[in-house]
Image: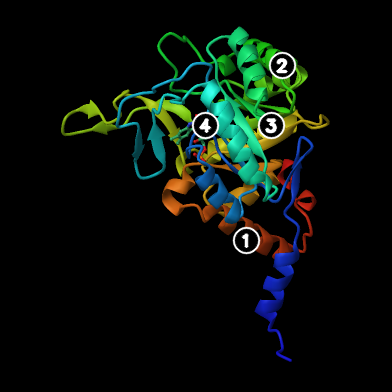
Amino acid sequence: MESIGTDQKETAAADKLDLGVTLCGVRMPNPTVLASGILGLSQEVFDRLAHLGIGAVTTKSCSLQPRVGWHNPTIVNWGHGLINAVGLSNPGVEVMVDEIRTAKLALKKHGVPIIASIFANTIFDFGTLTRYISEAEPDLIEVNISCPNIDTQHEEMFSSNAYVSAQVTRMVKRHARCPVIIKLSPNVDSIAAVAKEVVNAGADAICAINSLGPGIILDIDTARPILANRTGGVSGPAIRPIAVRCVYDICKALKGTPAQVIGTGGVTDARDAIEMILVGATCVGIGSAIYHHGFNVFNDISTGIQEYMGRHGYHSLEEFRGKALG
Ligand SMILES: Cc1cc2nc3c(=O)[nH]c(=O)nc-3n(C[C@H](O)[C@H](O)[C@H](O)COP(=O)(O)O)c2cc1C
């Protein structure tokens, strides 16, 4: 019989560590979540992600009517992350309901839940959209009230105002048949105050953060912005410390409530994911990192978390979740 070395023993032990999490009653195999808008909604892509060990997927944000979005270039890698002005392009809820149904079947085989992201122009439309999207029976609904690439017709994001954010939450909760996540923006005085209001209004979880900004990157030779829309949301490693601070503030403010948090923003590797869990996140959203590290990023992060747990003698994520909150 072959003997097993110390390294192999540690790896074998790490393999057994349970990374499973329950988000609003929905079981996930591990805490990694595909952030909204990063990949399309094809069954093949989701099937591949499930094979590669993803914990949950979020669809791109869907609106009542189809949206074309902004002209190219819409996404630029500026060296420290991305700046994007995709403009919430999507085929509209009618098409998305069918796509989510198909994707859900593919993911179910792997025990991977699907989160349907929605976006509307008015509080009333959020209600209508929730009714439609519920026909696809997503495991959870994520409400995007925080996109920085909003049309000029909107003076501000819904999430800039805690009262309006709470009204959207109530409307969605009235029509939803599954738990509701509200996605917040860091571009506010107190993200914790907004989080408290939406949780009081019935939100089951918070996703923090959406992209920061908007920002501008110039082509200095033409003296013009590179993005066709001129401005765009900033994401990736440059925003991570802000995202971590937001999750920290929210988790402190929500202590004692059952609300959970998806920590999103600049997470690239296991270290970054562990940091989010230490400030209280139940699971971790991953977006821009896919552009740099490909689909393996989810499995790499899970493996790295298991190694960390092995090193620290933890057997579950609960043992160190929120440890930095003091
Ligand atoms: C190209 C691109 C498209 C995005 N589209 C959406 C979207 O449709 N809905 C949404 O809620 N967030 C959208 N986001 C924001 C991400 O879901 C995420 O909150 C943000 O990028 C921060 O995470 P990251 O640094 O891991 O990318 C988009 C981000 C990028 C880079």
Q: Are marks 3 and 2 in contact (CB under 8 Å)?
A: no
The residue lying at 65 percent from left, 47 percent from top is 55
Query: Residue most toward the right?
Result: 256
Secondary structure beneath dot 3 equals strand
Q: Mark 2 or 4 closer to N-term? A: 4
Residue 51: % across, % down? 59, 55
226 vs 290, left or right, is left
What's the distance in space between the residues labelled 4 and 3, CA to CA?
14 Å
| Mark carried by residue 303 | 1
Q: Earlier in the sequence, mark 3 or mark 2?
A: 3
Q: Disc 3 designates what residue?
A: 140
Determine whether the beta carbon of the residue marked 2 sits less than 8 angstroms from the nearest atom of ligand 1: no
Q: Quadrant of the C terminus?
A: top right
Q: Is 259 placed left or right of 32 in the picture?
A: right
Give the percent coordinates (x, y) of residue 54.
Answer: 61, 50
Amino acid identity at mark 3? Leu
Tell me how far mark 3 sits from mark 2, CA to CA: 13 Å
Q: Mark 1 falls on what kind of element?
A: helix
Q: Residue at x 43, y 33 (%)?
A: 234
